[in-house]
Amino acid sequence: MGGAFVALADDVTTSYWNPAGLIQTASLRIGGTYESRYGGLSESQYLAGTLFSPTVGAGFLWVHSDIYSVYSISTALGLGELALGITGKRYVFSAPGQRASGVGIDFGSLYRASLGKINLAFGITSADIGWSEIQWQGEGYMARDHVAWVTRLGAAVSSEEAFGTWRSVLDLEMALRRPPRLEESDYFTAALQTSLDLGIEVLLNAMALRAGLADIRLEETGVLIQPALGLGIQMAGITFDVAWIPSQLGHTYTLSMEAQF
């Protein structure tokens, strides 16, 4: 759905998108993904598990891509229509002759309401609060880097119809790519990057059809838009998902599986 998921966050990837989403229906979920990016130039995988309940939730997530891994543990608390969640994570990098590590904290909130048969949800996440610091070490040197501090605002609208259920989502992402430098007068111009994600999903019994526009932003050459398509099938408590994202660097394919108990 174009990467717009902050206000939904209701599957096994919740720890990544919005830890507050761990307050959903009571269930245990385990899943994983394989992703081939840009025509095979890069690959990534994840393994995740979540324990959903109406009042307390927990989850873990391991993401690995090329030279780095991220290990995350999340928890959430439900307060009526409002839910709050927090994630602690550790970064580990490994490359020939050098290594690095760091820790980070994410915070998320989710509010749900209904207007007749229309369901509304609003979410806010702030990831790598304060720019998570990465310490690099190699032979004869030490250095440090920072992970971008990313805040996302999300909204979702859904409704059940005679043909099934539809959901429409929107995310606004604001990324501060680095901390301010001393005596920097144009910090936000240099470091702030904003983008918009839009998506829609139609649930037809055991099948889900998805489409979206990812990373919509204004560049010097014009408006950048990246389309995305997805399909999901559920059988006996197991969901299989596939997504396709085209780009000038090559197509990205994602294959996922999730089991619900």
Image: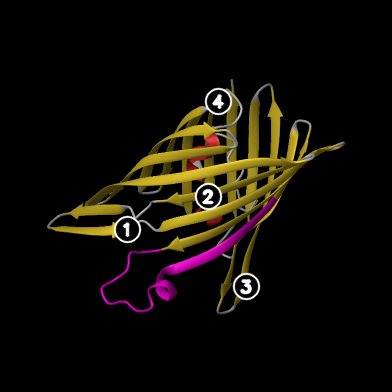
The residues bearing labels 4 and 3 have C-alpha atoms spaced at a distance of 41 Å
In the picture, the disc for residue 124 is 2
Residue pictured at 47% horizontal, 52% vertical? 42
Instruction: Tell me, for residue 249, which label it has, or none.
Output: none
- What residue range appears in magenta? 177-199
* Crowdedness near tag 3: few (<14), some (14–19) or many (≥20) residues, C-alpha within 10 Å: few
For label 3, the residue is 223
Question: Which mark is drawn over residue 146?
Answer: 1
- Which residue is located at x 26 percent, y 50 percent? 100
The correct choice, above or below, for 90 with respect to 95 in the image is above
Q: Nearer the viewer, mark 3 or mark 2?
A: 2
Work out whether residue 43 or residue 29 is closer to the camera in this orientation and state it: 29
Task: Looking at the image, tell me whether mark 4 or mark 3 is earlier in sequence order.
Answer: 4
Q: Position of residue 93 (x, y in %)?
A: 31, 48
Measured in 3D between alpha carbons, the distance from the residue under mark 4 to the one under mark 2, in whole angstroms, is 20 Å
Where residue 53 is drawn, which disc sits there?
4
Per the model, the C-alpha gap separating discs 4 and 1 is: 34 Å
Q: Assign a secondary structure to mark 1.
A: strand
**Rounded to the nearest whole Å, what is the CA distance between mark 1 and mark 2?**
22 Å
